[in-house]
Image (spheres, rainbow, N blue to C red):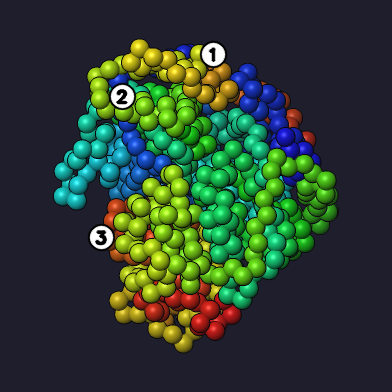
């Protein structure tokens, strides 16, 4: 059993007590909410005539169903279901006294982009949201995990979740990422190495020199995809990079309060002699830009590497590989480089931050999107959008032929009308390449970094972004 | 308090395959509803249909009325959407036997009173074969004793201890349990340096 890790310490500080079944009752420091998984929870609360216990610890945004063009965002929405969902969120947050970053606030966006950029996400917190990518917030040294709707009911009514402590696996990343290789490539590689269910029963602590060198937005991308490796939570110990990113943000503490909290943040970091249930080492040297070739995020290769053949797998991995070849129409032995692309999608809670758009813009500068490619740039939040517009990045996208959209989850899961059609192939900066994920059951998703999405948009096929010479 | 769930009995439905994710169990486009009432209609929606929209031979078309779902490895991975177990429950599933489950999915099932028990791959395959050979035969998940009974045989299965305790003792209403501790929760909150607002 682990001891002395950040996970152990944060857990202990938030533990209210033990429940009859042996689970712990854990206080939730930050609850983020969106329109898709919360209305049913408020319905359950009303059935029991219960109030929201800690409204000041919950913040809401709208992301999953929100249209991403200015015209479609006029109220009421043409999509009646989307309008109903947003109205439910407006009513629920208003009645409960929960702060809601609505469309007029200028702060609306994907929960996992909004929390960090506003300074709501802080080290040493327990953070939950009705979304599996809540693991993102672990980048700050928080214990952050996705929950279901009945658990949202629990959080609203009691400020707590019932949870079992998991094992802690330290994922030590040695070496150095090369030019044009970034956080997204690293996490895809880690999932490829450890498997899509390798993290079940575990929390991942990412550590080592390659992790320490990542900036905050890179760390957010790494922790975001913990769940794709089966780990419900993933975190990185807070350090100067964390504190510098946090300082000055709207909801971040200031002055004496900052100093007081800094003491707490430093106190929860993993001890040098902390005990882990498991330690694995992953090497970042010689890594190249990664692309998925299959239908789960662990089916991944370097862009110049051949797609592995069925004989390289055993058991269920072999069955899954066979399914993937058929769905994707890929040939084992060939590389993904040159695989035709119909759609380029840049955004999401994985890669929808300013640094992601900067990275892609460096590739797009002076280039033109292939005429056969539909290219969407969807900022992760309105804050990101405005920053990109101020920096002239939006202009680079538009001049290259990308549609420059408003903030939302968009084509990551295609709930808002942005969707693949038929068997279109999407070069996507998102986190899941499951069959049907992007709105068409025959659609094909290839996961990759923002720079690689930009390169694919220009070439109309998967291409090595490093050849563009941009500082990707 | 909620009712105790010691066993689930009924006919079975086998859904074969590893890593079946919640996007397959309920595609995202069906999540745009503010209640779970109609989720049963969307269970495995795409997998159950051919390209022209007609129903195919997916087990959820062929084994109507079944109460026990039999699945393979890492079932329910991906999204945290409770819509997935809600859809299965409203379709008629009251218990699941599998090789393994994704954690959020398992917790969501427990919150709805659906036991999820795990068995060796050979046992799961045997059970799936049995259901296919005799779809009308009854199966029992005996949660209290951690076994599955079918075809006059008993096999041992494993249940997460906390899940088993909650369901068997009728203590799976976590809201009611934790609400009793609201004062203690406020003390814990007050002891944290970042919650003094």
Identify the chain of the residue marked 1, using the numbered disc in the image: B
Mark 3 — residue?
A422
Identify the chain of the residue marked 3, using the numbered disc in the image: A
**Residue at the limit of the structure toward the front, as seen here:** A311
Are callouts 2 and 1 both on one chain?
yes
Q: Look at the numbered discs 1 and 3 and tell me whether their residues touch, using CB distance below 8 Å.
A: no
Q: CA distance from mark 2 to mark 3?
A: 37 Å
Q: CA distance from mark 2 to mark 1?
A: 31 Å
Residue B46 appears in the rendering: yes
Mark 2 — residue?
B130
Q: Identify the residue shown where x is 67% and y is 50%.
A: A280
SS under mark 3: loop
- 10 Å crowding of disc 1: few (<14), some (14-19), many (20+): some
Relative depth, front residue between B67 and A78: B67
Tell me: residue A216, above or below residue B116. below
Tell me: residue A297, above or below residue B115. below
Residue B158 in the image: state x and y as whole percent.
52, 24
- Compared across the picture, whether B76 is left or right of B61 comes to right
Q: Identify the residue shown where x is 35% and y is 44%.
A: B24
Mark 1 — residue?
B169
């Amino acid at each position: 059993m682990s001891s002395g890790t950040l996970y152990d310490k944060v857990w202990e500080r938030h533990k209210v007590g033990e429940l009859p079944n042996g689970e712990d009752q854990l206080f939730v420091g930050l609850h983020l909410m969106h329109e898709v998984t919360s209305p049913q929870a408020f319905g359950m609360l009303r059935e029991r005539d219960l109030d929201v216990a800690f409204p000041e610890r919950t913040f809401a945004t709208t992301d999953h169903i929100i249209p991403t063009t200015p015209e479609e965002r006029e109220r009421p929405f043409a999509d009646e279901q989307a309008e109903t969902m947003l109205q439910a969120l407006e009513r629920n947050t208003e009645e409960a006294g929960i702060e809601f970053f609505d469309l007029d606030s200028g702060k609306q966006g994907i929960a996992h982009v909004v929390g960090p950029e506003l300074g709501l996400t802080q080290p040493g917190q327990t953070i939950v949201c009705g979304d599996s990518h809540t693991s993102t917030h672990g980048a700050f040294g928080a214990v952050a995990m996705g929950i279901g709707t009945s658990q949202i009911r629990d959080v609203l009514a009691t400020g707590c979740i019932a949870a079992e402590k998991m094992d802690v696996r330290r994922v030590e990343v040695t070496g150095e990422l090369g030019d044009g290789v970034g956080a997204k490539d690293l996490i895809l590689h880690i999932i490829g190495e450890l498997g899509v269910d390798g993290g079940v029963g575990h929390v991942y602590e990412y550590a080592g020199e390659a992790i320490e060198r990542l900036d905050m937005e890179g760390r957010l991308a790494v922790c975001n995809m913990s769940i794709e490796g089966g780990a419900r939570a993933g975190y990185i110990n807070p350090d100067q990079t964390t504190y510098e990113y946090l300082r000055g943000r709207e909801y971040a503490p200031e002055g004496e309060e900052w100093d007081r909290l800094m003491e707490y943040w430093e106190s929860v970091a993993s001890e040098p002699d902390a005990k882990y249930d498991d330690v694995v080492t992953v090497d970042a040297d010689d890594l190249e830009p990664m692309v998925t070739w299959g239908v789960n995020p662990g089916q991944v290769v370097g862009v110049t590497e051949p797609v592995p053949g069925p004989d390289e797998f055993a058991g269920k991995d072999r069955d899954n590989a066979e399914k993937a070849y058929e769905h994707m129409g890929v040939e084992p032995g060939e590389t993904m480089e040159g695989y035709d692309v119909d759609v380029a999608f840049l955004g999401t809670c994985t890669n929808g931050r300013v640094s992601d758009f900067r990275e892609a813009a460096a590739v797009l500068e002076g280039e033109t999107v292939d005429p056969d490619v539909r290219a969407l740039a969807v900022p992760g939040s309105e804050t990101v959008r405005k920053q990109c517009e101020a920096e002239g990045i939006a202009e680079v996208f538009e001049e290259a032929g990308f549609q420059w959209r408003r903030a939302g989850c968009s084509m990551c899961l295609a709930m808002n009308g942005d969707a693949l059609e038929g068997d279109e192939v999407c070069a996507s900066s998102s986190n899941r390449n499951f069959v049907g994920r992007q709105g068409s059951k025959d659609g094909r998703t290839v996961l990759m970094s923002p720079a690689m999405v930009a390169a694919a948009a220009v070439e109309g096929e998967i291409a090595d972004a490093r050849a563009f010479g941009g500082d990707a | 308090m909620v009712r105790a769930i010691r066993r689930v009995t009924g006919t079975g439905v086998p859904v074969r395959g590893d890593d079946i994710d919640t996007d397959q169990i309920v595609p995202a486009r069906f999540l745009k509803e503010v209640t779970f009432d109609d989720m049963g209609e969307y269970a495995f929606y795409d997998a159950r249909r051919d390209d022209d929209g007609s129903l195919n031979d997916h087990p959820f078309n062929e084994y109507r009325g079944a109460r026990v779902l039999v699945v393979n490895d890492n079932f329910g991975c991906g999204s945290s959407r409770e819509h997935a177990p809600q859809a299965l429950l409203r379709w008629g599933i009251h218990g699941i036997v599998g090789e393994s489950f994704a954690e959020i999915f398992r917790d969501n099932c427990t919150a709805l009173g659906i036991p999820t028990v795990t068995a060796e791959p050979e046992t799961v395959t045997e059970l799936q074969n049995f259901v296919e050979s005799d779809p009308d035969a009854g199966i029992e998940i005996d949660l209290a004793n951690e076994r599955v009974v079918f075809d006059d045989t008993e096999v041992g299965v494993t249940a997460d201890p906390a899940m088993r305790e909650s369901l068997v003792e009728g203590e799976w209403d976590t809201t009611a349990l934790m609400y009793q501790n609201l004062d203690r929760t406020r003390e814990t909150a007050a002891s944290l340096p970042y919650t003094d607002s």
